[in-house]
């Protein structure tokens, strides 16, 4: 088996992946899985977020228009 070499490009890619992972975890801790801009408390299934309801309504309208 070949030895794994640590090149400057590898270090830059690994640092980039670590930074993106930290930002993703930070966002999940702040907002939870909700993408509603009104939800800042990280609750799962917040009452202000109607993204699913809006998506279902849009899909039903699109199906009727076909």
Image (spheres, rainbow, N blue to C red):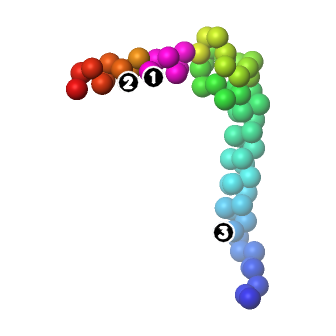
What residue is disc 3 on?
A: 9
Bounds of the magenta span? 50-56
Residue in the picture at 52% in, 21% down: 52
Q: CA distance from mark 3 to mark 2?
A: 45 Å
Q: Residue furthest left?
A: 66
Single out the mark in the foreground, 3 or 1: 1
Dot 3 and dot 2 residues touching (CB under 8 Å): no
Q: Earlier in the sequence, mark 3 or mark 2?
A: 3
Residue 34 drawn in magenta: no
Tag 2, which secondary structure? helix
Residue 51 drawn in magenta: yes
Q: Earlier in the sequence, mark 3 or mark 1?
A: 3
Residue in the picture at 64% in, 11% down: 47
What residue is disc 1 on?
A: 55
> x%, y% of residue 45?
67, 19
Dot 2 and dot 1 residues touching (CB under 8 Å): yes
Tag 3, which secondary structure? helix
Q: Classify mark 3: residues with Cα within 10 Å, few (<14), some (14-19) or many (20+).
A: few
Tag 1, which secondary structure? helix
What residue is disc 2 on?
A: 59
Query: Which of the two residues, 33 or 24, is positioned nearer the viewer here?
Result: 33
Total labels drawn:
3
Decide whether the magenta segment is chiefly helix, strand or loop: helix
């Amino acid at each position: 088996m070949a030895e794994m070499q640590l090149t400057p490009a590898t270090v830059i890619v690994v640092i980039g992946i670590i930074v993106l992972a930290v930002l993703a975890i930070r966002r999940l801790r702040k907002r939870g899985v909700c993408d509603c801009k009104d939800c800042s408390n990280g609750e799962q299934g917040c009452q202000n977020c109607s993204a699913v309801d809006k998506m279902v309504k849009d899909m039903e309208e699109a199906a009727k228009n076909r």
